[in-house]
Amino acid sequence: RRTAILISGRGSNMRALLAAAADPAFPAEIALVLSNRADAAGLLHAAEAGIATAVVESRPFGKDRAAFEAAMEKELAAHGIGLIALAGFMRVLTEGFTARWSGRMLNIHPSLLPAFPGLDTHERALAAGVRLHGCTVHLVTPGVDEGPIVAQAAVPVLPGDTAEALAARVLAEEHRLYPAALAWLAAGTLRLEDGRVLLEDAP
Ligand code: GRF
């Protein structure tokens, strides 16, 4: 399945997906890396890896999210994209866009959802005093960070943790989890029942 990775910045999850997809047996082909910022560091890496890249700057569209998304749709169509993986993509998507890509778009979020949706998850996990934290890959629905959960990985919160230390521990798990979840989606092993994901024949 031809897959686009949407980024806004560093792109470390994008790198993990590219590395996994370099294996010919991986069920998704990364056919495009699309950024809403021309200065996203991940773009350089993708280009060096020989992956097609595109920039659709969101800023000029201001509050007109639908027009921004229409510009993105053009790029996605031009590259024959059938699946989307959001990887540090910092724009909220409209209901129309999420409906068009329903069941075909994943996001990775740095918390054990439904705890800590939104931003600053590691700071909030420390402030809440949780002993376990982690990351979640979910299907994207209109509600931000609310879609059906596909996969999760947990890490301990350790005494003396800073948000940076905790973020690094979670990020290592993100890099492991996201390729696995994308492989399930691309291989057609995900089924939805009552708004929840069933895994069929998942490894
Ligand atoms: C990750 O922590 C991801 O979970 C969140 O944004 C961060 C992106 O990092 N959505 P990177 O650009 O993949 O390095």
Image: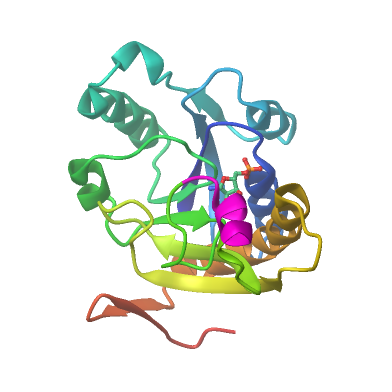
Report the coloring of the rendering.
rainbow
Pinpoint residue 105: horizontal percent, then vertical percent: 38, 54
Pinpoint residue 70: horizontal percent, then vertical percent: 25, 28
As drawn, 109 above or below 177: above
Whether residue 1 appears in this view of the structure is no
The span picked out in magenta is 119-127
Residue 159: quarter of image: bottom right
As drawn, 134 above or below 42: below
Pinpoint residue 141: horizontal percent, then vertical percent: 28, 56
- The secondary structure that dominates the magenta segment is helix
Q: Quick check: 113 left or right of 121?
A: left
- Name the residue furthest bottom: 201
Q: Residue placed at 39% from the left, 21% from the top?
A: 58
Quarter of the picture holding the C terminus: bottom right
Q: Residue placed at 65% from the left, 55% from the top?
A: 21
Asked whether 151 or 202 is in front, the reply is 151
Pinpoint residue 193: horizontal percent, then vertical percent: 26, 82
As drawn, 172 above or below 188: above
Q: Quick check: 114 left or right of 51?
A: left
Q: Residue placed at 33% from the left, 63% from the top?
A: 147
Whether residue 132 appears in this view of the structure is yes
As drawn, 167 above or below 41: below
